[in-house]
Amino acid sequence: MPPGCCFSFHNGIMKVTKKNMRTFLISVLMLSGFFSGCSTIEEQGGPSLSARGQLSIFLVGPEETTLDISFNLKAISIVSEDGTVVPISFETPAVIARSVSGSHIKLGESPLPAGKYTKLNLMFNSAGVKRDDKIISLTVSHEITTVPVNITVKRQQNTSLFIYWNSDGSVTDDNTFRPVMVERKKKQELSSALIYVTNEHADNVSVINRYTGEVVETIMVGRKPRGIAASFSGSRPRLFVANSGSDSVSVIDPAADRVEHEIPVRFGTEPVDLTVADISNEKKLLIVANYRSNNVSIVDLATYGELEKIDVGSGPVSLAADPPSDTLTVNRYLSPHDINELRSYREKFINVYVVNQNSNNVSILRIDIVTGRCVDVMNLDVDWDPRSLYVDYIRGRVYVANYGSDKLSVINIMNILSAGGTGAVTSINNVGNRITAVTSDPIFDRLYLLRDSPGEIVILRPSFDENDAVRTMMSPVMGRIEVGNTPRTLMLDTEKRKIFIVNQGSDDIYIIDKTTRKTEHRIRVGKKPYDIAVLYE
């Protein structure tokens, strides 16, 4: 401790009262515990969870840069309006200017006591500039770089702080690194331009502009968020997040970027996925898969009341509902007779398909349109270790991704209606194992399969014979697209002809142009991202 420096503790956090703040901060920041990731506020004996919020800090790069500058962070802290200094855990110690040019990265994320904060302090270990293929070391001042900010952290909410870095202006003529950084205010975003990604190990949801590839907000939810589903009804779009660690569902208002309601899952344990079933224009149900209790919960979205629980197979891990019946139009895959039969069925019932990972089957729930209650459950065996599924209503098929085999299971929806499920399951063989997700692209007549090792998209063309049955022979692989580490989820953006990939192992999202098969954006999000959703108006 510097001589003569006075300090006190407030809520378990050290508060400096001496004018010589800079000397004190340098001494504190050199503590080894600070640089190894910083203890959390809870570990410091600080405010309880209910009195804290969460702060995410993003570094925004310039549109263009002429200097290839890089730096290594030593420490980050933030200062409240009363002078309290709080260390921030940082995730990205090394930053290269050209890697953030026209983009951004997450610098750090930490829980914080609720309150107003006015300064962001950064210290740097080293910096350099690349010239003529050589790295020239820059002189780094050991003083703190202070960025004035004006943010308010609210209890049980996330606050996102965006710092703009003028990299070209951060090097002086005498090769000294003096970073030029300012707070950038958030822009108002259209809800239809946004995608939402759950971050399981960060307890939050990243909000991304799908046109620019920028993270524009972070929303704090429950513990270990996994599945996410979107619903748009009139003027009330909502997102629902399954919190597997707190047995609840967070209801997000995208207009306010906050959780407006928390639904406790009383009938199940460890909710991991959910889907919205459109019963009618006036009635919607939320179906929640509870992995640990081997059941699903049905929630009335008008009241947020849990109506009932339905026992399914072992380890329900993914589910999907029939899409709205108005998607049934004349197409080249289903006959007029099949379309009429489906429409007639949908006047009375809607199906929900549940993947049971541990019992290697799919439970099909028949839900009565009038009562909103499940009247029947059918179980169909699929292949080994199923992980997810996709309902392809245009073809009248449900595709099931089997992680433990090289077969893609295919369920014929028409067979379920007419034959009670007998002979409903066939397969497309030799697609490779370790498949975590599948989706269909009717425009390009393709199936996209996601493999987690190696991280890639496998592109298939589904084959049909003259009787409109899926062939069990090998489907030709049309191509492969490399993605990030341990990808878990993929989703097709039908409006922009993009593919979104959630990479758990590399904590990022890929936005891929499905025509060129090139990655347009690689977006860093929170720790261990899990699922993704889009709000379509």
Image (cartoon, rainbow, N blue to C red):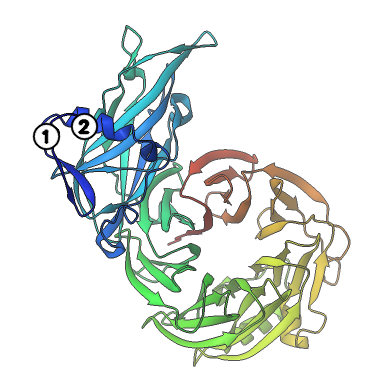
Q: Residue at 52% across / 45% down in the picture?
A: 508
Quick check: 159 left or right of 106? left
Label 2 element class: helix
What amino acid is at disc 1? Lys
* For residue 257, above or below residue 169: below
Residue behind mark 2: 24
Q: Is residue 512 left or right of residue 234?
A: right
How packed is label 2: few (under 14 Cα within 10 Å), some, or many (20 or more)? Answer: some
Task: Give x and y (percent) for residue 103.
Answer: 43, 35
Query: Between 446 and 209, which is closer to the camera in this rendering?
Result: 209
Number of other residues with Cα within 10 Å of mark 1, as a class: few under 14, some 14 to 19, many 20 or more: few
Residue at 36% across / 71% down in the picture?
Answer: 234
Q: Quadrant of residue 182?
A: top left
Tag 1, which secondary structure?
A: loop
Nearer the N terminus, badge 1 or badge 2? 1
User: Viewed as shown, does residue 22 lie left or right of 532?
Assistant: left
Between 1 and 407, the residue placed more toward the observer is: 1
Q: Position of residue 114 (x, y in %)?
A: 22, 55
Q: Where 135 falls versus 8 (above or below)?
A: above
Amino acid at dot 2: Phe
Residue 453 image offset from top left, x and y in percent? 71, 49
How far from the left and from the top, in percent, is residue 167? Answer: 36, 22
- Mark 1 in CB contact with mark 2 (< 8 angstroms): yes
Q: Name the residue located 52 percent from the left edge and 8 percent from the top edge.
A: 132
Task: Identify the residue at image location x=14%, y=33%.
Answer: 5
Q: Can you tell which mark lies on residue 432?
A: none
Q: Quadrant of the C terminus?
A: bottom left
Q: Which mark is residue 18?
A: 1
| Picture quarter with the N terminus | top left
Between the C-alphas of marks 1 and 2, the distance is: 9 Å
Above or below 441: residue 307: below
